[in-house]
Amino acid sequence: TVKWGLIGASTIARQFVINAIRAQADGEIAAVMSSSPDRATSYAKENGIPLAVSTLDELLGPDIDAVYISTTNELHLEQALAAIKAGKHVLCEKPLALTSADARKMVAAAKAAGIVLGTNHHLRNAGSHRAMREAIAARRIGKPIAARVFHSVYLPENLQGWRITRPEAGGGAVLDITVHDADTLRFVLGDDPLEVSAFTQAAGMASGGLEDGAMCIWRFRSGIIAQSHEGFTTKFAGTGFEVHGSEGSLIAKDVMTQKPIGSVLLRTANGEEELGFDREDLYVTSLRQFHAAMGGEGQPSATGEDGVWSLTSAEAALQSAKSGKSVAIDPKL
Ligand code: NDP
């Protein structure tokens, strides 16, 4: 059995990750930690978790093999370092930390301790994105030239909290969504972004100097250019991911989401073809790969290094928006 401790009584754990852990034949949730003892108790009760605690020391006891960190972003670093020190494998939510320098500290600590560190970039687990990655690697669109990511959504009312009011907690659309887009572009294209130019906006939802929308333009190592749009304020935009190459285009709709939905169309001189793909729950796939990595088989679907890449990319986008200049992306790995 793999015994998990949850660090954070969060929405994402309640909606997706608790189920994904329990969907593994050997996955068990042994404890949950909240900063509030009352919230820990009620969350444990609602989700059938045997132990509720309110300090890291209590959570990181001998019974726990791995922790899932889904607190607000400013807390990830300290909690991950404590878990690593206690010898626990760590699946951490994105962004790994508030700065790429801090994220690198997590990666270095995990490496030194020989433990598995994963970043929960769920989109890599989507059958849709995996189908696009495979089609590109198989040269079905010829030489990839450009990509477009449509990922501006409406932040549900129950989540209109720290993301739009608390810069110190790592709020804002860039740390929330641009990290995912940067990671998904890297994954699907099999290429790394080297430079970004970005505009951000506050369109009426976010306060405190935070952005609730962003548009970024990325240049990749191979010469591919990409654009991405992230936001919290557009109710009817829908999502999508397109890659255009010399011999074809991949056009995916409704795929920048937590659910295994959407469609992927391949358009070439031969006409149009819908690509079939696996519809497994993204988080179940993520947890399966993480469990395998804990057992010495392969790596988490997104590693700590991937988390450093996505955070470095988001950080560069924020810096670009602030300075009005394009910014180089160097994860220093
Ligand atoms: P939530 O706002 O639901 O939870 C974050 C923290 O807020 C919790 O750890 C909890 O603190 C506190 N909290 C929760 N409910 C209350 C309440 N009623 N009153 C006061 N405090 C409360 O955040 P999310 O689940 O949306 O996000 C958590 C993390 O997961 C973030 O890092 C985010 O970026 C990431 N995320 C990732 C997604 C993915 O698909 N990869 C999707 C969504 C989020 P405590 O634990 O101390 O009780």
Image: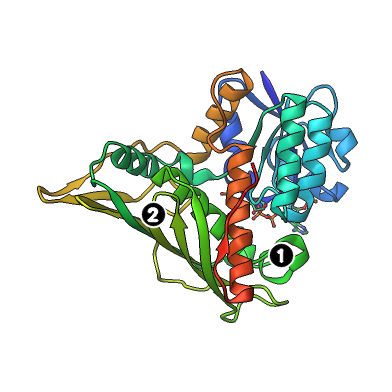
Residue lying at 60% horizontally and 52% vertically, measured from the top left: 330
Q: Is residue 103 visible?
A: yes
* Residue 164, horizontal then vertical, whole percent: 66, 70
Mark carried by residue 250: none
Q: Label 2's element?
A: loop
Check disc 1 and report the residue beneath it. 162
**Front in this rendered view, residue 260 or 103:** 103
Image check: 94 left or right of 253? right
Residue lying at 61% horizontally and 18% vertically, measured from the top left: 295
Check disc 2 and report the residue beneath it. 223
| Placement of the N terminus among the 4 image quadrants | top right
Going from N to C along the chain, the mark reached first, 1 or 2, is: 1
Q: Confirm or reject: label 1 Cβ below 8 Å from ligand 1.
A: yes
Q: Is residue 9 visible?
A: no
| Placement of the C terminus among the 4 image quadrants | top right
Residue lying at 59% horizontally and 69% vertically, measured from the top left: 320
Instruction: Give the label, 1 or 2, closer to the camera.
Output: 2
* Residue 293, horizontal then vertical, whole percent: 59, 24
| Marker count (numbered) | 2
Q: Give the residue type at disc 1.
A: Trp
* Residue 124, horizontal then vertical, whole percent: 47, 42
